Image (tube, coloured by chain):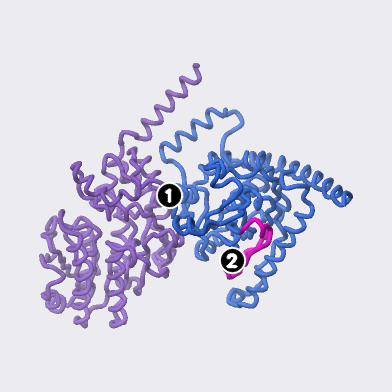
Chain colours: A purple, B blue
């Protein structure tokens, strides 16, 4: 009989894929999924608790089922339910984590805690180095929004790690997640027919393939896995936003940076929802994190580079009006005209 | 007095001839190594192939945002005429820049606008036999301005901070730093060619940690491109700039006043100061830091004086 693993925020696509992945793991005995919403699909052999991590029932669940490993995925950059307010998301991220950690502290049998975080914790003001290592101090606190949530969540996790030194605490700072069937925020942005950008800024993007993210999560859950610690998780290499837009064949519309606060409502007025101004700003803030530590610990780079991750996504969602093949034909025609003339 | 003027005149002539011969050699080698076209390919084909790659997004950008192709095909061709024809830069001692591996080039800073950094980048790319690419460390202001930040990253520049510098040096890149910063570039015309304080000497510690040589670099000519006779501090504070230059032409002539004067430049690279033989803990020794910082600073200052004595005039 393997260990009992509890996964929070398991209701979305990434969560259910992780559950499927963990079910195949011989080291995992019992799987408990927790989410506020009913799951996307019921998985056999997974006990699904439709409860809020903020409810006190969680302590009872953790203690009764003798949970040894907790995977905290319920740290989200976008509302899980469309239309939910930003403050509700923040409450879920920060207070949810506090409650979960409080519950975890009361469970003596807990051995391992894996927390999903984001490289957004580094913020991206112009006064910072181009590359962030795991030891770079989190600077997002001044920013706000999701970056700040993550900084606060990580603060509580550090406190928990101090109080329970025998628990292996692994914090995974993921770059933007993307995959062919992705419902991540980055994917929502790149599915827009025309990509709004900030005039005069061409951020560097670092992506992580959802398949790779699952592998990293499964690796972090495994026993004996990493002895805890903080890891940046991202594919090798970077793409600039303009480059990504060209590979996708989508036109970009530069927006003057003072106007970006109104962008979200302007888009909503046009019938495009799901991209608030804050989300837009943070999407367009480039940041690149060093992944040396993860590479050394896992024994190699992630299977997909940033460019390959994007190519995987573009294969499904690409082919915009400025698709590379189409432009190449135009250039070819121009060449013919020049040669003849 | 007349005699004293004649001697440097001839010497300068000979030097510039030698350096143009070197330049021809360097350029030839650069073409041989070039990643680009075969001999039969025409300029049109090359241009169209470049256009195709750009439109399709099929190019590489490194972690710092350096777009090699854009720099080589667009930015360098724009800067080359400024380098060759406008400032007529005479490059000396390029052999002191190592052909491979990391090295830190430390230069003086002047001229109100950072033309000196860009010209040093062109000098290294064009005149070095290995066609090396200089990665400049720039002030945070550069990365806050729209458009400028984008271009700076694509040209291979990054923020002047120890983390970025060390990362680049460890990757074997050639890093250029101007430790005087705003104190140097924004100093009044009356203080030209007087080196300002070299920060806290952080660049020395970075070079020691990365165990790379320090190459002192002296730039003559950039001081006179925008003779800054005054500094409108109130305007600068309002605009959030470190200084607001008043020159004989700017802002009186508007944008036209921002055109630099066509001075004659000399960029001289000095003998590298090796750091590889020092123990790793040397970077923690403040006395050694100060000593090395002073050594670099003195070398640059002396070279500046030497070049100034040998200079015929500001414009020729």
Image quarter for residue A162? bottom left
Q: For the residues carrying marks 2 and 1, which lies nearer the camera in this image?
A: 1
Query: Which stretch appears magenta?
Result: B188-217
Task: Assign a secondary structure to mark 2.
Answer: helix
Q: Is residue A151 magenta?
A: no
Query: Horizontally, is B131 left or right of A206 in the view?
Result: right
Residue in view at x 57 percent, y 61 percent: B181
Which quarter of the image is occupied by the C terminus of chain B? Answer: top right
- Residue B307 at x, y = what percent? 75, 54
Image quarter for residue B270? bottom right
- Residue B52 at x, y = what percent? 45, 34
Residue at mark 1: B146
Residue in view at x 64 percent, y 78 percent: B287
- Residue B150 at x, y = what percent? 45, 49
Residue at mark 2: B203
Residue placed most toward the observer, A165 or B138: B138
* Tag 1 subunit: B
Above or below: residue A260 compared with residue A250: below
Query: Horizontally, is B35 left or right of A278 in the view?
Result: right
Residue B175 seen in render:
no
**Mark 2, residues whose alpha carbon is within 10 Å: few (<14), some, or many (≥20)?**
many
> Distance of mark 2 from mark 1, alpha carbons?
27 Å
Q: Is residue B198 magenta?
A: yes
Figure label count: 2
| Disc 2 and disc 1 in contact, CB within 8 angstroms | no
| N-term-proximal mark, 2 vs 1 | 1
**Mark 1, residues whose alpha carbon is within 10 Å: few (<14), some, or many (≥20)?**
some
């Amino acid at each position: 009989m393997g260990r009992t693993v509890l996964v929070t925020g398991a209701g979305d696509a990434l969560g259910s894929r992780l559950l499927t992945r963990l079910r195949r793991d011989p080291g995992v005995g019992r799987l408990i999924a927790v989410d506020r919403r009913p799951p996307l699909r019921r998985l056999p052999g997974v006990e699904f608790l439709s409860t809020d991590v903020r409810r006190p029932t969680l302590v009872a669940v953790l203690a009764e089922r003798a949970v040894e490993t907790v995977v905290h995925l319920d740290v989200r950059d976008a509302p899980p339910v469309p239309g939910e307010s930003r403050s509700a998301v923040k409450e879920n991220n920060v207070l949810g984590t506090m409650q979960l950690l409080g519950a975890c502290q009361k469970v003596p049998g807990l051995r391992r805690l894996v927390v999903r975080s984001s490289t957004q914790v580094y913020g991206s003001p112009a006064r910072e180095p181009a590359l962030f290592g795991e030891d770079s101090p989190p600077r997002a606190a001044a920013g706000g929004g999701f970056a700040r949530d993550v900084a606060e969540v990580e603060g509580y996790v550090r406190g928990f790690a101090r109080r329970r030194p025998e628990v292996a605490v692994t914090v995974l700072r993921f770059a933007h997640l993307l995959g062919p069937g992705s419902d991540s925020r980055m994917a929502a942005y790149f599915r827009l027919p025309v990509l709004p950008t900030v005039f005069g800024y061409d951020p560097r993007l670092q992506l992580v393939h959802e398949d790779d993210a699952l592998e990293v999560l499964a690796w972090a859950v495994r026993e004996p896995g990493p002895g805890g610690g903080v890891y940046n998780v991202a594919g090798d290499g970077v793409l600039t936003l303009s480059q990504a837009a060209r590979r996708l064949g989508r036109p970009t519309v530069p927006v003057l940076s003072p106007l970006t606060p109104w962008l979200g409502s302007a888009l909503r007025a046009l019938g495009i929802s799901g991209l608030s101004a804050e989300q837009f700003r943070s999407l367009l803030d480039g940041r690149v994190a060093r992944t040396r530590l993860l590479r050394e610990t896992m024994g190699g780079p992630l299977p997909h580079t940033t460019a390959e991750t994007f190519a995987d996504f573009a294969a499904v969602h690409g082919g915009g009006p400025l698709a590379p093949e189409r432009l190449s034909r135009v250039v070819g025609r121009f060449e013919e005209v020049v040669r003849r003339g | 007095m007349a005699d004293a003027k004649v001697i440097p005149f001839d010497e300068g002539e000979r030097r510039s001839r030698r350096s143009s011969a070197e330049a021809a050699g360097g350029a030839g080698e650069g073409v041989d190594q070039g990643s680009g076209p075969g001999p039969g390919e025409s300029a049109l084909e090359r241009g169209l192939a470049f256009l195709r790659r750009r439109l399709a997004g099929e190019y590489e950008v490194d972690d710092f945002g350096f777009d090699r192709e854009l720099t080589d095909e667009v930015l360098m061709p724009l800067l080359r005429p400024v380098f060759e024809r406008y400032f007529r830069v005479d490059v000396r001692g390029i052999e002191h820049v190592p052909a491979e591996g990391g090295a830190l080039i430390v230069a003086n800073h002047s001229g109100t606008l950072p033309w000196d950094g860009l010209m040093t980048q062109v000098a290294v790319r064009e005149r070095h036999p290995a066609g090396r690419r200089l990665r400049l460390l720039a002030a945070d202001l550069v990365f806050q301005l729209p458009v400028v930040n984008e271009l700076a990253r694509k040209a291979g520049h990054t923020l002047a901070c120890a983390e970025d510098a060390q990362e680049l040096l460890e990757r074997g890149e050639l890093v250029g730093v101007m430790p005087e910063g705003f104190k140097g570039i924004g100093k009044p015309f009356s203080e030209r060619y007087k080196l300002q304080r070299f920060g806290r000497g952080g660049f020395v510690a970075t070079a020691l940690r990365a165990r790379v040589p320090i190459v002192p670099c002296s730039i003559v000519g950039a001081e006179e491109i925008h003779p800054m006779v005054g500094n409108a501090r109130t305007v600068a504070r309002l605009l959030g700039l470190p200084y607001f230059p008043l020159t004989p032409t700017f802002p009186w002539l508007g944008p036209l006043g921002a055109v630099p004067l066509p001075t004659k430049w000399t960029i001289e690279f000095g003998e590298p100061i090796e750091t590889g033989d020092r123990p790793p803990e040397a970077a923690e020794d403040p006395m050694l830091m100060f000593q090395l910082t002073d050594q670099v600073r003195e070398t640059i200052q002396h070279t500046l004086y030497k070049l100034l004595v040998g200079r015929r005039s500001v414009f020729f």
